[in-house]
């Protein structure tokens, strides 16, 4: 039987997938020779809304950019069994490469199964790993298998997963907790959202295996409040898994019991730090605790606890079923398996990319991502968000590997990969991240609370053209001391975006300070807008749109901008059809 | 609670939440989230009530309510615009969109229009980076925004609010 | 309990396994600075001051909360730790919006704790007030009368209505301490009241304050010059137990206070009483002795001559405080004529003629200056000279000044007094020529000036209006335009280009070993008396350290200061209370004699005036752990100047005033309230940089319990919490 499946992840819906789904449904009669279903996100966000047409389990056509007005055409073609008329909508071969070049483990079910239906997950070997673990493996054997796989924490730090599990297992105490950090706070990363929205059972299964391994009596997902759809899907998946007997008392009759619940966070980036997350779970302000004690000894409710991130758990079931060695066969010496990246920014094909470790950044950006929009020049790629750094173009051949990336001053991070072109100001980028971290600082320690604020103030004055000689050195001095003095990971890594931009783009800082010039022509206070009289046709479009009434000129003659009045909003530039407005 | 329009009715709803959460201090965040669902924001009477019902000191409840960006101590407009300021959105021009929204509505971030229709709040990341720049109005996400698109969307909502009449809060 | 051994800053320390580094360090006498740690409260790790680095350990550790491991080798002084600690302190100070000490004290060259003594005066404790003043200034009754009071120029009360009358309050208290109700009342020469019962009221009156003198050190110091600077140095060196002798060329001690300031401003018996108090401590005062060479000025003639060299031999240290006693000349043709006098020469001549300790201030011999007198200059010496001329019977007294009143360096009050006494001010004029007949002054030709464009310093300099002159008939011309040092006898010393002794600004050392120099004779030259006193007390510290074997340069202590603009805004709405005005004798009365012009404050007025104090300086200054810690490092918070966290002052806690401006968010108040008081009243509100601490409670029993607890205030490392009522 044919099936029309609409991808309805958050970004699909944002692109109109919900309307498309409703429109298709509206076109259908009671008796159709096909079904309508939905799935999560396959990661090709740049083509949303995406509609897949299946014949049984076989994908026969992938239609892209299917807006609601095309529903009629899709329905009638499928109904007629003749899809040739849809060729306009069919994905282009080069765009298909976006997926074909990937190796998907964590994302293996995303965009394929129906996330709201446990049967759909089970059809793809779902819960087989949990069954295997509970029926044929000791917790120690599970930990050993994970050790063999070389799986490391995908939240960013890259700490060996087995080690944490083992520490929690060894920690004395009857009451233990297994916690999933789904507080994906890096602004620019959305892998975890995609997993929970599109494959929630995979997360549940991975967590239950871990819970068994450490001996936890309760597993808790701490999920970001900004992800309403993920919460809905997770909630439903927990209900179904409980009903199916995969969570709760005496699971699968093995005697193993473990409760499962989620808690929605309330908006605080610092809760990505594990002790802050625990505080938040306990209903408190999410302020990091002093370490030691580490969570493995005294975490949630001061009981032994283990915390991993969503992507880490998403690999677990696969490793158990396929063996740790197969996982470890992928990647590099010290970075095993695959890694998911949220590829965004000035990239042509943005979305979710899962590839084996060891490939180069250039491969991800150019081969998979299709390079830079409008064929502009790439300037840098940002990894690790507010904790990470900007890697310049000349280092794009760096391989994806925890150590190799750290050597550049950036970090692997949770998977945010934001591509920047020549029009992105790197000082502005540093300012953006410091603005973020200073707002998200919990305020506990001096170095982070006041330090990030002062760094932001210095960066602000630089982009406003008020930078002073010595500001770069002062920033560096602050950076090193904040790294040394801050209490938790947020503060200790907050200087990274500044340090890497100073390291690779010092000339941009110097231009802002010394020449009061923004080389990327992005910092508003340092810009002037001009009209090229040769190109201006006198169409008056810009003058009519200018909110500050700063443009004058008569019809069919060249216009000009009054710099006194200009508020540098850029409206004229985006309005002009003749490319006559330039910025200097 | 003297100012609250329908005290008993509202407290009943909150009591139900408190019962579900076992009046447990550990569930404070969930309780406050539900309270905000009910009242639209967290009035100080509610803060004190939750404190008395959970045994947490009012200072502690206040501390939690002001720590997380999701909580509001002031009512918001009928439509809450959450403008994403994540990295991808920043790279693709969300600052300009903020200017456009602010000038269009005559408010700045964190404020509500005098007619009570719109509130603007910038948020860290909505996780729709591939469609950046993005904003969310109540539960609806809008992606690949431009200045013109934003103005159009705001006009649609304004029209909708006028048709429906009345404001929340 | 298992014991472990660690090394901190090179010192081997023994502790129990599981103990924090800080605990072990403290038990072993190694100091590790911290602000957020407090005994009996759980550690929190906020301040980041207690960082230590361990050999072979990658990360810096917080000593307060890191359990030490056996064998660790730790340091608080590695480059990394020092940098991180420095930044932490700079960050804290850049966000700490408070005044350590009042701006009054900061502007006082002697750093006198004005706020401290004003508070005592407000409480009626005049003796206590004098004790505070005498920590920096041994001559409060004298200085209170004559000081141009830079303190008042900085007084924040000026943003409300007018500055406090600080100097005059000081002399009120000092007079009380000397048991004077008026400068001439019931005091016999040189006697010192030793306390006892007041015959009239039957109340116990404390004796005149006599500071403690430390155990004799056996070291000897010679001070050359008995002016305010020399006397101050002697006073403080004596208090430290050194044997001090002050030599002075004049017949009496006091220097310019004795021979420069006229009797009507400072009755000499007051000065004499204060100097007697210094002598009372055991300072030897030797008059009529001068150093080397020809006697200059002539007043020194007759003094015994000794050499600097002999003093160096006989004493362990020598402090030179000889002042600047030579008048500068007018510098125009005809200035050599008879009847052209130097300002300070003139004043000294009168001072020598005024009968000492005569309540009427009559002259022992006539001084003839004629009926028409012109004084050149716009400073306080010019004011003293013109008003003295009036008292000597001159009928037309002119002050010739090349700028306008706005630019005059003299005190406003002095100018007003002079005008009241009939002095004529010739602004925008400058002597062009002194015309004499038979060698005697007859007229003065004045060049008319106008103010030109402002110079680099922003001051508009006077320029001659070409061809425009004015002529005055005069009998005497007094040049009060400056004073210089007479270097005679000090030839071995190094002088600067202006002929002034070069002394190190932080140690007062001269080029000669063991010889220090202060006051008008050094560096920048002549200044006001309180500046000399300031150098006197700083030099005493340095010389004391020198005598103890290692010279410790004087370093201005780092203090936190609030932004004036912010304060100005805060004070805009403050309730006004007018400054109490010093009652004075009428001009008609006073222009005929040398009796003191000021009548002194009434007690009621002085208490009222003292109560106007805004108490800008921090109540916790002495005990503040923040400033104590900050001063241990070389910090420069100004480079990290930025926005302050949200601040406010509130009294929601019944008996505690909370000043959020000063809060450093160490959370000790919250933690003590939670853990020790078990109240949970205080909590953090907001997040990050904008978080503040606020009380939140609505239970009357909790409020009552809060009232008497004060544990939070005890734990606060700064002055953010103040117990009131």
Image: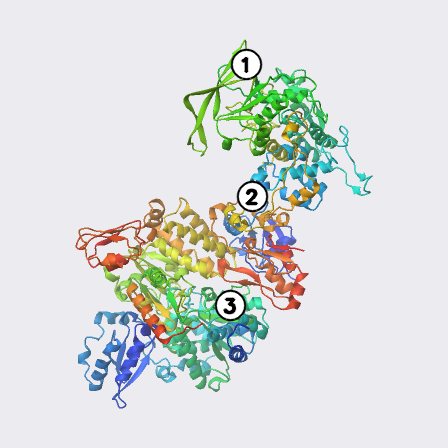
Q: Please tell me if label 2 and label 3 are on a single chain.
A: no
**Which mark's residue is nearer the viewer, 3 or 1?**
1
Rendered position, B94 above or below C171: below
Q: Please tell me if label 3 and label 1 are on a single chain.
A: no
Residue C158 has which mark?
Answer: 2
Residue C212 visible in this rendered orientation of the protein: no
Q: Picture quarter containing residue B101?
A: bottom left
Q: Which residue is mark 1?
A: C441
Rendered position, C389 above or below C533: above
Pick whichever, C305 or C460, lies toward us: C460
Measuring from the top left, give residue C298's x and y in whole percent.
62, 16
Rendered position, C156 above or below C720: above
Task: Check the picture and name the quadrant holding the N terminus of chain A.
Answer: bottom left
**Which mark's residue is nearer the viewer, 2 or 3?**
2
**Which mark's residue is nearer the viewer, 2 or 1?**
1
Residue B65 has which mark?
Answer: 3
Give the alpha-carbon distance from disc 3 to disc 1, as whole Å: 86 Å
């Amino acid at each position: 039987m044919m099936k029309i499946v609409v991808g309805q992840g958050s970004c699909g819906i944002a692109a109109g997938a919900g309307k498309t789904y409703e429109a298709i449904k509206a076109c259908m009669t009671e008796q159709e020779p096909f079904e309508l279903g939905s799935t999560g996100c396959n990661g090709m966000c740049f083509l949303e809304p995406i509609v897949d047409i299946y014949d049984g389990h076989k994908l026969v056509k992938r239609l892209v950019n299917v807006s609601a007005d095309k529903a009629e055409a899709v329905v009638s073609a499928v109904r007629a069994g003749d899809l040739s008329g849809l060729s306009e909508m069919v994905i282009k071969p080069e765009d298909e490469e976006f997926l074909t070049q990937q190796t998907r483990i964590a994302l293996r079910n995303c965009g394929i199964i129906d996330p709201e239906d446990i049967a759909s997950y089970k059809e793809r070997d779902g819960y087989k790993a949990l069954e295997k673990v509970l029926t044929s493996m000791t917790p120690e054997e599970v930990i050993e298998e994970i050790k063999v796989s070389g799986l490391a924490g995908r939240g960013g730090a890259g700490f060996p997963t087995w080690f944490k599990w083992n520490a929690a297992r060894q920690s004395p105490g009857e009451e233990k907790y297994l916690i999933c950090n789904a507080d994906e706070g890096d602004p620019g990363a959305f892998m975890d959202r995609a997993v929970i929205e599109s494959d929630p059972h995979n997360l549940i299964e991975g967590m239950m295996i871990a819970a068994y391994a450490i001996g936890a009596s309760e597993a808790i997902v701490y999920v970001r409040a900004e992800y309403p759809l993920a919460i809905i899907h997770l909630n439903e998946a927990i209900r179904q898994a409980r009903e199916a007997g995969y969570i709760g008392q005496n699971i699968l009759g093995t005697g193993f019991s473990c409760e499962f619940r989620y808690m929605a966070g309330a908006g605080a980036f610092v809760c990505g730090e594990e002790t802050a997350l625990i505080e938040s779970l306990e209903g408190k302000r999410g302020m990091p605790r002093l370490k030691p004690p580490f969570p493995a000894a005294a975490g949630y409710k001061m009981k032994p606890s283990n915390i991993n991130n969503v992507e880490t758990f998403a690999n677990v079931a696969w490793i158990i079923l396929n063996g740790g060695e197969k996982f470890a066969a992928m990647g590099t010496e010290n970075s095993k398996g695959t890694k998911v990246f949220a590829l965004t920014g000035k990239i042509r094909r943005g979305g979710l990319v899962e590839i084996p470790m060891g490939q180069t950044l250039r491969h991800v950006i150019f081969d998979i991502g299709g390079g830079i929009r409008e064929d502009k020049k790439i300037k840098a790629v940002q990894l690790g968000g507010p904790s990470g750094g900007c890697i310049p173009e000349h280092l794009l051949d760096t391989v994806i590997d925890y150590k190799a990336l750290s050597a550049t001053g950036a970090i692997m991070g949770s998977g945010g990969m934001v591509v920047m072109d020549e029009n992105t100001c790197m000082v502005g980028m540093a300012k953006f991240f410091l603005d973020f971290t200073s707002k998200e600082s919990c305020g506990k320690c001096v170095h982070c609370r006041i330090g990030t604020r002062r760094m932001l103030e210095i960066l602000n004055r630089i982009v406003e053209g008020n930078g002073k000689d010595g500001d770069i050195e002062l920033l560096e001095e602050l950076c090193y001391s904040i790294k040394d003095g801050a209490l938790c990971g947020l503060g200790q890594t907050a200087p990274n975006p500044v340090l890497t931009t100073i390291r690779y783009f010092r000339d941009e800082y110097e231009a802002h300070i010394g020449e009061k010039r923004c080389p990327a022509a992005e910092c508003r206070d340092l810009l002037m807008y001009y009209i090229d009289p040769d190109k201006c046709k006198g169409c008056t479009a810009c003058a009519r749109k200018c909110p500050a009434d700063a443009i004058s000129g008569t019809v069919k003659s060249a216009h000009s901008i009054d710099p006194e009045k200009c508020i540098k909003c850029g409206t004229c530039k985006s309005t002009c059809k003749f490319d006559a407005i330039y910025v200097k | 609670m003297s100012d609250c329009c329908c005290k008993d009715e509202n407290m009943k709803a909150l009591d139900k939440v408190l019962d579900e959460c076992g009046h447990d201090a550990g569930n404070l965040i969930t309780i406050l989230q539900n309270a905000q669902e009910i009242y639209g924001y967290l009035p100080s009477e509610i803060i004190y009530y939750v404190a008395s019902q959970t045994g947490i000191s009012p200072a502690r409840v206040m501390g939690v309510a002001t720590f997380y960006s999701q909580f509001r101590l002031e009512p918001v407009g009928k439509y809450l615009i959450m403008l994403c300021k994540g990295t991808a959105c920043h790279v693709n021009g969300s600052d300009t969109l903020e200017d456009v929204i602010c000038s269009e509505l005559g408010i700045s971030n964190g404020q509500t229009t005098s007619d009570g229709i719109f509130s603007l709040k910038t948020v860290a990341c909505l996780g729709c980076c591939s469609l950046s720049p993005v904003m969310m109005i109540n539960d609806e996400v809008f992606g690949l925004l431009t200045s013109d698109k934003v103005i159009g969307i705001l006009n649609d909502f304004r029209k909708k609010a006028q048709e429906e009449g009345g404001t929340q809060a | 309990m298992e014991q472990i051994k660690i090394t901190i800053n090179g010192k081997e320390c023994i502790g129990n396994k599981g103990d924090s580094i800080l605990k072990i360090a403290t038990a072993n006498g190694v100091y590790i600075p911290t602000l957020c740690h407090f005994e009996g409260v759980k550690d929190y790790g906020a301040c980041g001051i207690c960082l230590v680095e361990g050999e072979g350990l990658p990360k810096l550790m917080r000593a307060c909360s890191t359990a030490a491991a056996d064998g660790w080798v730790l340091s608080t002084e590695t480059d990394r730790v020092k940098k991180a600690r420095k930044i932490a302190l700079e960050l804290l100070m850049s966000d700490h919006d408070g005044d350590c000490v009042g701006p009054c004290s900061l502007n006082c060259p002697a750093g006198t704790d004005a706020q401290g003594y004003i508070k005592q005066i407000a409480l009626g404790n005049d003796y206590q007030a004098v004790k505070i003043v005498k920590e920096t200034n041994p001559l409060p009754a004298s200085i209170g009368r004559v000081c141009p009071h830079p303190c008042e120029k900085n007084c924040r009360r000026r943003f409300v209505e007018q500055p406090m009358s600080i100097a005059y309050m000081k002399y009120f208290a000092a007079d009380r301490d000397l048991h004077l109700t008026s400068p001439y009342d019931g005091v016999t020469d040189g006697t010192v009241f030793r306390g006892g019962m007041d015959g009239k009221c039957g109340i116990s009156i404390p004796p005149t304050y006599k500071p403690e003198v430390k155990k004799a050190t056996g070291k000897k110091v010679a001070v050359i010059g008995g002016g305010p600077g020399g006397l101050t140095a002697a006073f403080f060196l004596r208090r430290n137990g050194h044997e001090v002798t002050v030599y002075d060329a004049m017949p009496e001690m006091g220097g310019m206070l004795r021979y420069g300031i006229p009797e009507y401003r400072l009755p000499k018996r007051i000065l004499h009483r204060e100097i007697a108090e210094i002598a009372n401590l055991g300072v030897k005062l030797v008059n009529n002795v001068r150093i080397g060479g020809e006697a200059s000025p002539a007043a020194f003639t007759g003094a015994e001559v000794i050499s600097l060299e002999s003093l160096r031999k006989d004493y362990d240290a020598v402090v030179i405080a000889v002042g600047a006693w030579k008048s500068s000349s007018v510098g125009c043709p005809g200035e050599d004529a008879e009847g052209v006098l130097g300002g300070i020469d003139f004043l000294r001549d009168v001072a020598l003629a005024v009968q000492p300790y005569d309540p009427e201030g009559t002259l022992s011999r006539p001084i003839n200056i004629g009926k028409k007198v012109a004084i050149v200059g716009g400073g306080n010496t010019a004011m003293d000279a013109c008003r003295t001329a009036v008292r000597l019977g001159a009928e037309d007294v002119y002050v010739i000044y090349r700028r306008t009143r706005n630019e005059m360096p003299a005190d406003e009050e002095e100018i007003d007094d002079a005008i009241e006494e009939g002095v004529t001010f010739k602004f925008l004029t400058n002597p062009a020529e002194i015309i004499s007949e038979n060698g005697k002054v007859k007229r003065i030709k004045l060049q008319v000036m106008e103010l030109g464009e402002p110079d680099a310093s922003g001051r508009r300099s006077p320029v001659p209006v070409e061809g425009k002159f004015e002529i005055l008939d005069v009998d005497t011309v007094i040049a009060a335009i400056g004073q210089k040092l007479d270097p005679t006898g000090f030839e071995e010393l190094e002088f600067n280009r202006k002929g002034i002794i070069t002394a190190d600004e932080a140690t007062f050392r001269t080029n000669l070993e063991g010889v220090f120099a202060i006051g008008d004779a050094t560096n920048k030259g002549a200044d006001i008396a309180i500046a000399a006193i300031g150098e006197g007390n700083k030099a005493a510290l340095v010389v004391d350290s020198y005598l103890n074997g290692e010279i410790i340069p004087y370093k201005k202590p780092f203090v936190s200061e609030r932004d004036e603009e912010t304060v100005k805004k805060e004070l805009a709405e403050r309730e006004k209370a007018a400054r109490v005005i010093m009652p004075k004798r009428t001009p008609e009365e006073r222009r005929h004699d040398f009796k003191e012009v000021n009548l002194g404050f009434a007690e009621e007025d002085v208490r009222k005036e003292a109560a106007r104090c805004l108490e800008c300086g921090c109540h916790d200054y002495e005990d503040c752990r923040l400033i104590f810690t900050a001063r241990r490092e070389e910090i420069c918070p100004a480079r990290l100047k930025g926005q302050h966290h949200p601040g406010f002052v509130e009294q929601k806690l019944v008996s505690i005033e909370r000043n959020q401006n000063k809060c450093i968010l160490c959370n000790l108040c919250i933690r003590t309230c939670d853990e020790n008081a078990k109240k949970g009243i205080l909590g953090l509100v907001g997040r990050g940089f904008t978080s503040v601490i606020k009380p939140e409670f609505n239970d009357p029993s909790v409020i009552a319990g809060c009232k008497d607890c004060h544990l939070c205030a005890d734990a606060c490392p700064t002055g953010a919490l103040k117990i009131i009522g």
